[in-house]
Image: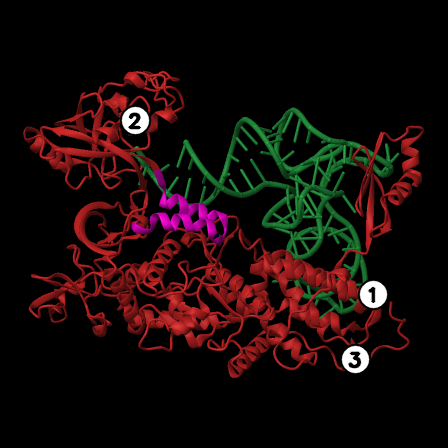
RNA sequence: GCGCGGAUGGCGGAACCGGUAGACGCGCGGGACUUAGGAUCCCGUGGGGAGACCCGUCCGAGUUCGAGUCUCGGUCCGCGCACCA
């Protein structure tokens, strides 16, 4: 303890200046801008730390709370790393191309180019008020020709590598957005944006062959330092399954043979019919001539695919599949329950041991045969384990072993082999829309699709008045004749430009490569910069992008790595997903009227309070429930910090207990901040501030060291007020350039313990002890407690369990 | 259906390796200061009981000296995928 105060400490004299967040925050931001505090020295960084967050789509409604939450949490991490001595690069940009922006522009009747310029300006201003450590010198927008020039360049690298293909396929057509959608953008058979029922159409489209990387992308997930949840989502999306390809001869139709994929070759003897997906692009090749007309009519009359399977829908095609082992002649049918786009689009049906096939067989009076013993296939499909039956000389073989035996036998006959299938499909990037980067291809009548030469990039999106989709399956760009008609780069004869634009996910699949190199006009990413800064050290974003964006960018990075253009195959060393902010226990939505508007809170409480509350209201990885009252607690906390930092400060060493307290705080906050456990880091800071308040009330003075530590540890969360107080407490420079305090483990260790005494596991007393007191001594003290003596009476303890510094449990 | 998370006071949430359940914040109750305050500060706050104590982390079993934490079985909620053969 310091000596009791003989006289009141010197004070500043007048009343304490109240905390005015408006002037403080404006002043700090001005200072940062003047001093270039947030700029990273990209060429000389010795400890480069690339702190990336998912760039926003700049919606016209402006910054929403989810953006704020994502960025604040990521920014706190960047600021923490910086205080720990890293050279942190924290860039920001705008993902402004795409259907999202275009649909809104159409609704408002404003040209997307104009609208985007405005919404970006608005977003940028809002972001600046959040006190984020962005290096605005490296801002980018995907709609900028200087950016999408390189998006096109990336496409061409993939094209040259044989990873971009123009081919016909069944595509998802949204009749409302009037465009093709990627499989990933179809949710329960509906468009993810407008929820219209999606239709199947056959169009020639550009695909990126991500499936060529399926196995690599799958294998590499094991090495990633990502949230486990995200890795699992990626693995499930890639969806590897092992089984066999089996060839059946066909009779009575144009197609002479068909290959099917199955994960259960052991059930081959139970195959009683074959089914072709109703959406199979060459369905008619499986139909016998006399049935063609009827089947065609049937396909046309099919209702749109529903989320719920309907097994009563199906039709006989009149052709026959010959069983490769038994020679049995199996009927061939078509049904919508089989996917034309997965595997070969045709299956062998084993109704005895597959639930879907069983229901279909029942509905269409097809035979059901038991080939794995263990169930009763007349009443229900049996998908469990067992021995093979009705399988010729393989009867009695275990089903697992049977898989190999059947494949072996097929192999010997040249009728099949072991095979792997992935759920992952190639990435369809063609969009028949206006607001995107034109795909840099020229279609020539003689040379086919020809790439635009690199030196002709960018293929600038022409300015047109009519940007609405035509609905004909072609982009509005098709109407811009003077743009469309160009000579073929190869032969010089008249040719036409590709008029589709690319998917916005291609824009965001490489933006992290551009940030460090934004000032380079003639390369997409400078070699030296890229090798110094990539891969990203920490990536923080929403879990909604756990599959699409993360997988696409991993694919692009990997492809570029194989071309020797980037230093590593994986783009993001660490990834952490943040949770979601809800309000009143429910997702925010306009219809519910519970949307929290950030601007109002920043205006009223200041960005620091707002940031602090966002990070405090729940674990960052989980999100939390916003409460209008809750934020006031954080305002009180910062008011207290403000008062404390203006109190008289004492440069003395203070008491050992005070110093221990400070070191314990550093240890706790450091560890929790590093692990993104912000809510508990902040609660430790609040506790400490209350302890300092007690000191102040008692002694009228605070230790300068305590106040400085509080300010520094708080700086990643509340960057303005801490910087201001850092200056006011006499420190030169910005708090954000200071060195994070370091704790001494010995001092941070607990020195006094409260030892609980239990009798048979129930607490009966406690006593204080010096940390590290020998076990025998703890025992003795515990047994000597009067209360314990009383409870024990004349019973002798049967056993004593002693946990150092914690517990003595007396078992009688 | 499959996969992954959860379930703790009036509310949001803490709790390291199994060791005082409920840190911290909100709300609420009481007090101080105020002309007044929905401002600020102090004290209290899981339930029951006058009390020693008893009960209490979704439910039911189990392991253990000791379980919010581990095991088994179940209920409910959230998220993702979903005719993937």
Question: What chain does badge 1 belong to?
Answer: A
Q: Name the quadrant of the C terminus of chain A.
A: top right
Q: Which mark is residue A11?
A: 3
Same-chain status of marks 3 and 2: yes
Q: Name the residue under label 1.
A: A656
Chain that is green in the image: B
Residue A741 in the image, given as x and y percentages of width and height: 68, 69
Left or right: A123 as drawn, with respect to B23: left
Nearest to N terminus: mark 3 or mark 2: 3
Residue contact between numbered discs 1 and 2, judged by CB atoms under 8 Å: no
Chain that is red in the image: A
Specify the segment rendered in magenta: A212-241
Per the model, the C-alpha gap separating discs 1 and 3 is 25 Å
Q: Name the residue under label 2.
A: A406
**Magenta stretch, main secondary structure class:** helix
Residue A263 in the image, given as x and y percentages of width and height: 33, 32
Secondary structure of the residue carrying tag 1 is helix
Secondary structure of the residue carrying tag 2 is helix
Residue at the (82%, 70%) spot, across then down: A654
Secondary structure of the residue carrying tag 3 is loop
Nearest to N terminus: mark 1 or mark 2: 2
Q: Report crowding for label 1: few under 14, some 14 to 19, many 20 or more residues within 10 A (C-alpha).
A: few
Q: Which of marks 1 and 2 is in front?
A: 2
């Amino acid at each position: 303890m310091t000596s009791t105060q003989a006289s009141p400490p010197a004070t500043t004299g007048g009343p304490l200046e109240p905390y005015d967040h408006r002037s403080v925050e404006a002043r700090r931001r001005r200072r940062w801008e003047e001093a270039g505090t947030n700029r990273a020295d990209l060429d000389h960084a010795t400890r480069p730390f690339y702190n990336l967050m998912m760039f926003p789509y700049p919606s016209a409604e402006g910054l929403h709370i989810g953006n704020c939450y994502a960025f604040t949490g990521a920014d706190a991490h960047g600021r923490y790393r910086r205080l720990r001595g890293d050279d942190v690069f924290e860039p920001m940009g705008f993902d402004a191309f795409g259907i999202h922006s275009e649909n809104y522009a159409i609704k408002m009747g404003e040209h997307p180019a104009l609208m985007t310029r405005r919404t970006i300006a608005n977003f940028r201003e809002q972001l600046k008020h959040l006190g984020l450590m962005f290096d605005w010198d490296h801002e980018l927008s995907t709609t900028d020709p200087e950016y999408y020039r390189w998006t096109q360049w990336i496409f061409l690298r993939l094209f040259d590598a044989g990873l971009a293909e123009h081919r016909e396929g069944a595509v998802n057509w949204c009749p409302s957005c009037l465009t093709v959608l990627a499989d990933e953008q179809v949710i329960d058979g509906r468009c993810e944006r407008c929820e219209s029922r999606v239709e199947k159409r056959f169009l020639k489209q550009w695909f990126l062959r991500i499936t060529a990387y399926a196995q690599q992308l799958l294998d590499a997930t094991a090495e990633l330092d990502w949230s486990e949840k995200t890795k699992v989502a990626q693995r499930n999306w890639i969806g590897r399954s092992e089984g066999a390809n089996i060839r059946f001869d066909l009779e009575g139709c144009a197609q002479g043979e068909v290959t099917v994929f199955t994960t259960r070759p052991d059930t081959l003897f139970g195959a009683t019919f074959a089914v072709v997906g109703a959406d199979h692009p060459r369905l008619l090749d499986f139909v016998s001539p006399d049935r063609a007309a009827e089947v065609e009519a049937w396909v046309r009359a099919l209702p749109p695919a529903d989320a719920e399977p309907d097994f009563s829908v199906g039709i006989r095609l009149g052709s026959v599949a010959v069983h490769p082992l038994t020679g049995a002649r199996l009927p061939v049918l078509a049904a919508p329950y089989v996917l034309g786009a997965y595997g070969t689009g045709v299956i062998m049906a084993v109704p005895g041991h597959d639930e879907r096939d069983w229901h279909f067989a029942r509905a269409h009076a097809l035979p059901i045969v038991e080939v794995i013993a263990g169930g009763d296939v007349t009443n229900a499909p049996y998908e469990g384990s067992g021995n093979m039956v009705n399988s010729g000389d393989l009867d009695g073989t275990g089903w697992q072993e049977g898989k190999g035996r059947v494949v072996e036998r097929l192999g010997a006959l040249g009728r099949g082999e072991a095979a792997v299938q992935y759920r992952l499909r190639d990435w369809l990037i063609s969009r028949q829309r206006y607001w995107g980067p034109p795909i840099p291809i020229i279609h020539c009548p003689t040379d086919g699709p020809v790439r635009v030469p690199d030196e002709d990039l960018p293929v600038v999106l022409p300015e047109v008045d009519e940007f609405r989709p035509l609905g004909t399956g072609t982009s509005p760009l098709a109407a811009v004749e003077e743009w469309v008609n160009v000579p073929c780069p190869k032969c010089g004869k008249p040719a036409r430009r590709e008029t589709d634009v690319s998917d916005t996910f291609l824009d965001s699949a490489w933006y992290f490569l551009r940030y460090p190199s934004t000032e380079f006009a003639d390369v997409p990413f400078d070699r030296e910069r890229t090798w110094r800064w990539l891969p990203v050290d920490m990536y923080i974003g929403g879990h909604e992008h756990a599959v699409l964006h993360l997988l696409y960018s991993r694919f692009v990075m990997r492809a570029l790595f194989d071309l020797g253009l980037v230093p590593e195959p994986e783009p993001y060393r660490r990834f952490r997903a943040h949770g979601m902010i809800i309000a009143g226990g429910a997702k925010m939505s306009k219809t519910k009227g519970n949307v929290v508007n950030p601007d109002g809170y920043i205006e009223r409480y200041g960005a620091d309070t707002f940031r602090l509350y966002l990070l405090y209201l729940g674990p960052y990885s989980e999100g939390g429930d916003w409460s209008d009252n809750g934020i006031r607690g954080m305002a009180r906390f910062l008011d207290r910090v403000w008062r404390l930092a203006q109190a008289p400060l004492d440069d003395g060493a203070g008491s050992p207990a005070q110093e221990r307290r400070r070191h314990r705080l550093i240890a706790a906050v450091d560890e929790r901040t590093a692990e993104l456990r912000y809510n508990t880091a902040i609660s430790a800071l609040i506790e400490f501030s209350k302890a300092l308040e007690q000191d102040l009330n008692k002694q009228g003075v605070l230790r300068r060291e305590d106040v400085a530590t509080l300010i520094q540890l708080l700086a990643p969360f509340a960057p303005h007020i801490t910087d201001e107080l850092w200056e006011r407490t006499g420190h030169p420079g910005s708090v954000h350039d200071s060195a994070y305090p370091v704790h001494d483990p010995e001092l941070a260790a607990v020195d006094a313990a409260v030892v609980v005494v239990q009798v048979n596991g129930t607490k009966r007393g406690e006593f204080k002890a010096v940390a590290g007191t020998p076990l025998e001594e703890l025992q003795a003290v515990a047994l000597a407690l009067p209360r314990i003596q009383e409870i024990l009476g004349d019973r002798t303890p049967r056993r004593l369990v002693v946990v150092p510094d914690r517990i003595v449990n007396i078992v009688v």
